[in-house]
Image: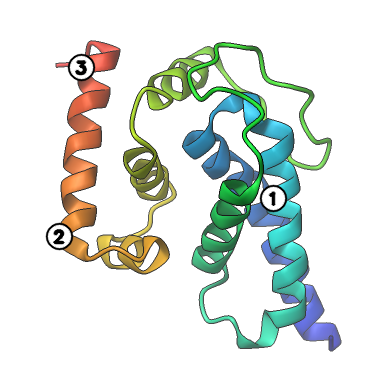
């Protein structure tokens, strides 16, 4: 990889690695932190090989890492309330109490709703979320609407 391209990839890695791990934790639960870090690292390794051909690295990383998490054997029940494992040193992921409450609430949603909310949180548009998830935009909007309503109910927000 040429110097300029490698510098771009490294900047993407520094900026996106913590966000990618958080995205996976929102989708799969905070007890899967090590698995999320492994899937994120693996996605970045694949991205490194394809860097010059990937148009939207943020979206591509989320698609690849999400699929890698789905392929992993389930180690933890999604509704487990265990404490997170040790954080990867490179990711600067300190969870505040409010974030822990939101992650616990997210675990109560179906996976499709967790995924779209995590992508909304990461500031992807409905069109981009549809591309990442392989769903049409109407289905994405409906999942977002249902997920937001469920989260308001779970968190007691009116």
Residue in the image at 74% along x and 22% along y: 85
Reading the image, the residue beneath label 2 is 138
Secondary structure at numbered mark 3: helix
Kindly indicate the quadrant of the structure image that contains residue 67: bottom right
Reading the image, the residue beneath label 1 is 39
Mark sitting earlier along the chain (1/2): 1
Relative to 71, 101 lies left or right: left
Determine whether 85 is above or below 144 in the image: above
Residue in the image at 80% along x and 78% along y: 6
Secondary structure at numbered mark 2: helix
How dense is the environment of label 1, judged by Cα within 10 Å: few (below 14), some, or many (20 and up)? many
- The percent coordinates of residue 18 (x first, y second) are 66, 44
- Disc number lying in front (3 or 1): 1
Q: Quadrant of the N terminus?
A: bottom right
Relative to 2, 127 lies left or right: left
Residue 90 visible from this viewpoint: yes
Residue in the image at 62% along x and 34% along y: 74
* Of 72 and 3, the residue lying toward us: 72
Q: CA distance from mark 1 to mark 2?
A: 29 Å
How dense is the environment of label 2, judged by Cα within 10 Å: few (below 14), some, or many (20 and up)? few
* Of 64 and 99, the residue lying toward us: 64
Check contact, mark 1 vs mark 2: CB within 8 A: no
- The percent coordinates of residue 81 (x first, y second) are 55, 11
Residue 92 visible from this viewpoint: no
Reading the image, the residue beneath label 3 is 153
- The percent coordinates of residue 24 (x first, y second) are 56, 42
């Amino acid at each position: 990889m040429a110097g300029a391209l490698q510098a771009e990839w490294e900047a993407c890695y520094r900026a996106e690695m913590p966000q990618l791990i958080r995205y996976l934790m929102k989708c799969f639960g905070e007890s899967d932190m090590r698995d999320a870090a492994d899937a994120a690292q693996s996605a970045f390794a694949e991205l490194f090989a394809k860097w010059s051909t990937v148009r939207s690295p943020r979206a591509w990383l989320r698609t690849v890492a999400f699929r890698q998490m789905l392929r992993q054997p389930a180690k933890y029940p999604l509704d487990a309330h265990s404490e997170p494992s040790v954080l990867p040193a490179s990711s600067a992921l300190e969870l505040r109490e409010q974030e822990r409450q939101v992650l616990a609430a997210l675990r109560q949603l179906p996976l499709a709703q967790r995924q779209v909310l995590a992508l909304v949180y990461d500031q992807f548009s409905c069109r981009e979320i549809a591309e990442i998830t392989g769903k049409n935009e109407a289905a994405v909007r409906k999942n977002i609407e249902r997920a937001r309503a469920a989260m308001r109910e779970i968190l007691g927000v009116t």
